[in-house]
Image (cartoon, rainbow, N blue to C red):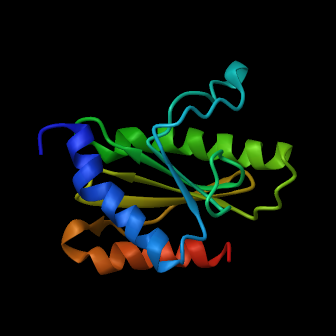
């Protein structure tokens, strides 16, 4: 695949949509939406994907998961950007008085997936790396996260 858009449409979106379907559409999925939480802190801009803990919604209300697509295939360099999106989600939830214990995130090339968890001020990067040749494992990681918000 030659473009990020193609990767999003052919690999990443189908996996996220499958996860949403497996959960009876109990989560909203947003792609390419502006998420301007605190411009003064640099917590603004478009997110590649955000999962919100509210079904069938037309606005981001309870962000629980942010996914960042890599630009050029380097996952490690995108981890800080995804972490910033997670901090923005955490701050958003605090302002909206959403009692969310943790916000999760993922950086992916489409082929390689790395998951993260932000709980309070602690950012945990999963030591495991997930690969597209094992989609059930990726779906399992997503399901583990989504089960926390049912």
Image coordinates of residue 90 in percent, x first then y, are 72, 48
Occupied quadrant, residue 117: bottom right
> Position of 119 compared to 25: left or right?
right
User: Could you tell me which residue is drawn at 22 percent across and 58 percent down?
Assistant: 111
Q: Is residue 140 left or right of residue 43?
A: left
- Say left or right for 87 vs 33: right
Q: Is residue 131 visible?
A: yes
Camera-nearest residue between 89 and 122: 89
**Picture coordinates of residue 60, whole percent (x, y):** 65, 46
Q: Is residue 143 above or below residue 101?
A: below
- Residue 141 horizontal/vertical position (percent): 45, 74
Task: Classify residue 117 as left or right of residue 127.
Answer: right
Residue 25 pos. (x, y %): 54, 70
Eyeballing the image, is 2 above or below 56? above
Q: Residue at x 61, y 28 (%)?
A: 44
In this view, which residue lies farthest toward the right?
A: 97
Total marks shown come to 0
Which quadrant is home to the C terminus?
bottom right
Name the residue rendered at 32%, 41% in the picture.
Answer: 70
- Residue at 34% x, 78% y: name it: 137
Query: Camera-side residue: 74 or 11?
Result: 11
- Can residue 109 be seen from the camera position used here? no
Question: Looking at this rendering, what residue extends furthest in the left direction?
Answer: 1
Q: Nearer the viewer, residue 61 or 84?
A: 61
27 is higher (above) or lower (below) than 51: below
């Amino acid at each position: 695949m030659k473009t990020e858009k193609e990767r999003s449409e052919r690999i990443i979106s189908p996996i996220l949509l499958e996860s949403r379907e497996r959960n009876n559409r109990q989560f909203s999925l947003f792609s390419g939406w502006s998420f301007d939480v605190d411009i003064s802190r640099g917590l603004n801009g478009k997110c590649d994907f955000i999962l919100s803990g509210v079904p069938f919604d037309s606005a981001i209300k309870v962000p629980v998961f942010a996914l960042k697509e890599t630009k050029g295939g380097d996952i490690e360099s995108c981890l800080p950007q995804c972490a910033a999106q997670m901090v923005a989600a955490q701050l958003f939830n605090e302002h909206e008085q959403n009692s969310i214990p943790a916000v999760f995130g993922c950086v992916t090339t489409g082929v390689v997936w790395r998951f993260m968890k932000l709980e309070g001020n602690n950012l945990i990067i999963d030591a495991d790396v997930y690969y597209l040749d094992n989609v059930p494992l990726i779906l399992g990681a997503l399901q583990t996260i989504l089960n926390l918000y049912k």
